[in-house]
Image (cartoon, rainbow, N blue to C red):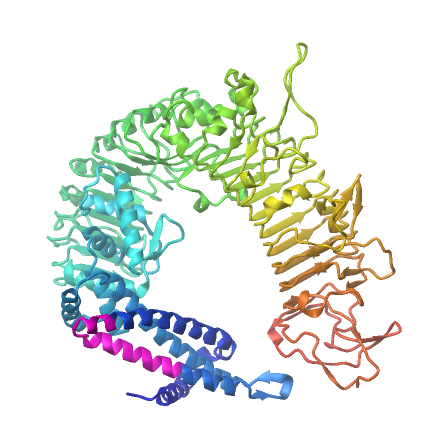
């Protein structure tokens, strides 16, 4: 058994060896010193928490007379040795870090290098022990002692197949975790993941399609949708076993590169998989015939063998350069092939040997150069999935209609596709998923003279099994009155023009149930505004699965007066994101003109609850009066009309789940929230976290006093370019309240951004009879970032009634105990940043400030010598000096309006590469010019 000191000494020797071999890589250790030490402490804490229950289980086992196997004892001994080594290391750290080099008051970087490297190494070992325990514990949870012993025997045998560069203990732990997956579905999905590229985001739907094609799932799902649900559940199991990682969203999953290497090893051993990515040439003849699945990816292979003779092959996934051509006889020896995926290949023409693949159920030709694809009709007996995404096909042949067993047809991103003959799509009556390219718009009815039969939107009505649809319908007139996709569970439907980069919309951000209305002129189409959703997804009164599944609606550049009827809005039970942009004629989001259903006053009076809506964005709506305006009742001589001067939100609509609210260029509103009529605090806006208000020129404030209780969760507040705004928060002072009581308007606020508010006088103020009282004491307990830009009239963050010659930005009336970053740009009315006399105690405000872009005067005391080092900012790491035309120096003494630049300044943590000076005449960092 090594002593802790020997462990530390060995590590120190290793440090010297590594430094000599790779100096550059290790220059970062001194600068990551604190992080490495902190991470080490975290890992040791995790290890100790894990060790305790293991010890308790061992004691219980000993009491029952059971034998403790050597591997468990070895793990405990190794954990003990590491713990003692860490304790010795931490004690040594405390002594060493007290030794500082006195020049420039900086730490001893040599010492820090050694300590940091030791911390990282110990931390890695701690992680390794922790991971081994996690994998093994997850795999054998609830198993009997014989199961443990059996597993150990299995692991000993698997040690012979360990992988280079992977710790044998970690390999055996991962192998054990795989072996004890009780679900064969889980094992199948785990091994399928290793066929995809390293570090890739693996689509869950891709896994489900392969599982369906190869009939891998035990439950034998009837539909692709059922298969996706099963695979999602399986993926959850694999994540709990630490075998898979979260992807970028719920539709994707990732596999760690180390786990992938283990998966490849297991797949090769048990299922005869061959996975080679980055190979330079095709594998030699005689080396691949036994394999059942092959995944090859290469940037350099240009020639392929004339014929494959792989009699057991069921899955083939290939990716090459586009210049790589597929020989005509290439698939002759692969009669058992069920899944074929070719990526970025040139297949001109399609090889005749494809007709030999009578068992093929899934064919993917992604981003391939294709010609005539009529030969695919020969795959009609089994083919269920056909993916041509990103390929250059210009027309679908009539023969494609013979593939009547197709469940999925994906034409997404086929931007050159111009012709889909009439009747082809309707013949594919078993289709469950259908993806059209967004660029396709050659539908029947789009032109006056149509010489050839074109696909019509009506054809889709015959696809009764359709559950997934991606489509763009260029004109509303193409929609039949009773289209109604009633059973869609996943859809992305665009009506109008395709989205462009200028639309600021990222396709990746859309959910799986989205509708986009883009540049649709409803007036020209002669339609009632809100009927579009009912025509697409079914009328609200019908049992429309599609309508109820809508989670995301984006409307932009549309000639709408209003979007929803009240009954339509009430049926949007799952709507999570609503975005309305650049609709210049819109007066309300919810309206009820011209609809006989909505004349019942009781129905209109009921609150509309957007119970699932988390994101609401209202952009460029210059005529918007209110989200759901109050109606001025009609008389015998006049019609219904909106009441004047309404707030954006009132008591008629509720947003209990809303987290993000953006209001940009809504120039007609004078108030965001109604002064008196709002729903109770816990029914609306109570979960709001982000509030952004831009270019609302009639707004004079953002938050009135009665709204503050429901905004207690706001973390990010940004207000820009509201020309009439005088104050951000308006408070109501009750008679019994004293003026010296601290107000905390946003207890959770982390960042506050105020810019181009030319009439802003203060952030918070009391208001009484149209008079503002700025004598308010405000605390922002968690604010970390404060940005003030272009505030022409602001003379104090919280103005006072006392007018003085000096106008400090901050005084004793405002506290920022957690502020870390302060930015001040173009605030010309202030003469000082901090009040000379009236400031809160040091530990109550600005004590955590790290980033500051302005400079300050120093007050020289008589007893101070001019050669004494001044440390104005002991924690300063970044300094920016930009557009300071009158800058003379960074620091100076001031006495009777005279500046003395003879100052010795030290910035102990400021690095040269983090100083940004954008003023060419500043020649000396601290000297008169």
Dominant secondary structure of the residues highlighted in magenta in the image:
helix
Q: Quadrant of residue 524?
A: top right
Q: Quadrant of residue 767?
A: top right
Across and down, in percent, residue 618 comes to: 58, 38
Q: How many marks?
A: 0
**Residue interval drawn in magenta:** 58-86
Q: Residue at x 77, y 73 (%)?
A: 889
Q: Is residue 861 above or below residue 571?
A: below
Which residue of the protein is positioned furthest toward the right in this rendering?
A: 896
Of the pair 644 and 424, the residue shown nearer to us? 644
In the displayed structure image, the side of residue 145 where residue 321 appears, left or right? right
Of the pair 88 and 892, the residue shown nearer to us? 88
Q: Residue at x 59, y 49 (%)?
A: 712
On-image quarter of the C terminus: bottom right
From where the camera sits, is residue 196 visible?
no
Q: Is residue 277 above or below residue 707?
A: below
Across and down, in percent, residue 453 comes to: 33, 23
Q: Residue at x 35, y 23 (%)?
A: 458
Across and down, in percent, residue 54 comes to: 28, 70
In the displayed structure image, the side of residue 81 where residue 355 appears, left or right? left
Q: Is residue 362 above or below residue 857?
A: above
In the displayed structure image, the side of residue 143 where residue 610 appears, left or right? right
Q: Quadrant of residue 885?
A: bottom right
Residue 60 magenta: yes
Across and down, in percent, residue 369 comes to: 31, 46
From where the camera sits, is residue 820 visible?
yes
Residue 22 magenta: no
Q: Is residue 270 above or below residue 88?
A: above
């Amino acid at each position: 058994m090594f002593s802790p000191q020997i462990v530390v000494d060995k590590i120190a020797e290793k440090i010297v060896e590594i430094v000599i071999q790779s100096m550059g890589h290790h220059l970062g250790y001194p600068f990551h010193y604190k992080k490495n030490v902190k991470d080490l402490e975290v890992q040791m804490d995790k290890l100790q928490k894990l060790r305790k229950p293991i010890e308790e289980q061992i004691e219980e086992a000993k009491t029952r007379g059971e034998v403790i196997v050597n591997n468990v004892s070895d793990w405990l001994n190794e954990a003990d040795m590491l713990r003692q080594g860490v304790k010795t290391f931490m004690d040594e750290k405390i002594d060493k870090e007290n030794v500082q080099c006195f020049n420039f008051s900086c730490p001893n970087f040599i010492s820090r290098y050694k300590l940091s490297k030791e911390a990282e190494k110990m931390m890695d070992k701690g992680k390794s022990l922790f991971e081994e325990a996690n994998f093994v514990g997850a795999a054998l949870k609830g198993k009997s002692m014989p199961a443990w012993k059996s597993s150990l025997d299995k692991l000993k045998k698997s040690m012979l197949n360990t992988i280079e560069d992977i710790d044998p203990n970690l390999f055996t732990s991962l192998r054990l975790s795989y072996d004890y997956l009780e679900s064969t579905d889980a094992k199948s999905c785990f091994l399928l993941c290793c066929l995809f590229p390293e570090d890739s985001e693996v689509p869950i739907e891709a896994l489900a399609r392969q599982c369906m094609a190869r009939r891998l799932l035990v439950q034998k799902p009837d539909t692709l949708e059922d298969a996706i649900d099963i695979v999602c559940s399986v993926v959850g199991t694999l994540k709990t076993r630490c075998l898979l990682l979260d992807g970028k969203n719920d539709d994707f999953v990732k596999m760690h590169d180390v786990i992938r290497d283990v998966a490849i090893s297991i797949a090769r051993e048990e299922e005869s998989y061959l996975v080679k990515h980055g190979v330079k040439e095709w594998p030699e003849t005689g080396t691949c015939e036994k394999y059942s699945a092959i995944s090859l990816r290469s940037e350099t292979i240009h020639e392929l063998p004339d014929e494959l003779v792989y009699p057991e092959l069921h899955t083939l996934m290939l990716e090459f350069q586009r210049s790589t051509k597929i020989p005509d006889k290439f698939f002759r020896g692969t009669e058992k092939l069920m899944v074929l995926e070719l990526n970025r290949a040139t297949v001109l023409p399609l090889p005749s040997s494809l007709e030999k693949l009578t068992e093929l159920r899934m064919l993917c030709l992604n981003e391939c150069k294709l010609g005539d694809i009529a030969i695919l009709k020969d795959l009609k007996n089994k083919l269920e999935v056909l993916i041509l995404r990103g390929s250059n096909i210009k027309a679908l042949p009539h023969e494609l209609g013979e593939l009547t067993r197709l469940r999925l047809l994906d034409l997404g991103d086929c931007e050159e596709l111009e012709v889909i003959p009439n009747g082809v799509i309707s013949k594919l009556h078993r289709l469950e998923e259908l993806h059209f390219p967004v660029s396709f718009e050659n539908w029947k009815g789009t032109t006056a003279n149509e010489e050839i039969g074109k696909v019509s939107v009506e054809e889709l009505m015959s696809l009764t099994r359709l559950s997934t649809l991606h489509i763009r319908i260029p004109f509303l007139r193409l929609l039949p009155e009773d289209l109604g996709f009633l059973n869609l569970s996943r859809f992305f439907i665009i009506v109008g023009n395709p989205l462009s980069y200028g639309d600021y919309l990222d396709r990746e951000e859309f959910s799986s149930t989205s509708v986009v209305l883009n540049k649709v002129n409803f007036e020209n189409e002669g339609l009632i505004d809100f009927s579009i959703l009912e025509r697409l997804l079914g009328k609200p009164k019908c049992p429309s699965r599609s309508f109820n599944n809508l989670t995301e609606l984006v409307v932009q550049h549309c000639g709408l007066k209003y979007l929803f009827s009240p009954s339509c809005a009430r049926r949007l039970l799952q709507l999570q994101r609503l975005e309305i942009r650049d609709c210049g004629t819109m007066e309300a989001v919810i309206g009820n003109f011209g609809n006989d259903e909505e004349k019942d006053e009781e129905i209109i009076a009921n609150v509309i609850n957007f119970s699932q809506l988390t994101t609401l964005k209202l952009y460029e709506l210059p005529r918007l009066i209110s989200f759901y305006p109050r109606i001025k009742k009609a008389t015998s001589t006049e019609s219904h009309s909106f009441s004047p001067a309404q707030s954006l939100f009132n008591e008629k609509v509720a947003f209990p789940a809303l987290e993000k609210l953006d209001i940009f260029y809504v120039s007609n509103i004078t108030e965001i929230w109604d002064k008196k009529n709002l729903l109770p605090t816990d029914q609306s806006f109570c979960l709001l976290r982000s509030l952004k208000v831009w270019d609302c020129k009639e707004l004079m404030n953002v938050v009135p006093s009665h709204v503050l209780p429901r905004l207690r969760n706001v973390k990010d507040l940004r207000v820009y370019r509201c020309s009439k705004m005088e104050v951000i928060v308006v408070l109501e002072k009750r008679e019994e309240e004293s003026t010296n009581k601290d107000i905390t308007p946003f207890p959770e606020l982390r960042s506050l951004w105020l810019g181009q508010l030319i009439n802003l006088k203060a952030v918070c103020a009391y208001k009484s009879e149209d008079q503002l009282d700025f004598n308010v004491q405000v605390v922002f307990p968690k604010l970390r970032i404060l940005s003030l830009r272009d505030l022409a009239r602001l003379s104090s963050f919280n103005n006072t009634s006392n007018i003085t010659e000096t106008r400090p930005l901050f005084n004793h009336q405002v506290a920022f105990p957690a502020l870390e970053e302060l930015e001040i740009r173009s605030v010309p009315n202030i003469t000082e940043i901090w009040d000379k006399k009236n400031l809160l105690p040091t530990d109550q405000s600005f004590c955590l400030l790290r980033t500051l872009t302005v400079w300050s005067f120093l007050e020289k005391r008589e007893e101070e010598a001019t050669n004494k080092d001044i440390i104005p900012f002991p924690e300063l790491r970044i300094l920016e000096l930009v557009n300071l035309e009158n800058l003379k120096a960074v620091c100076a003494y001031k006495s009777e309006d005279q500046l003395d630049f003879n100052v010795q300044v030290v910035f102990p943590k400021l690095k040269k590469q983090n100083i940004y000076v954008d003023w060419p005449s500043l020649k000396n960092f601290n000297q008169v010019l």
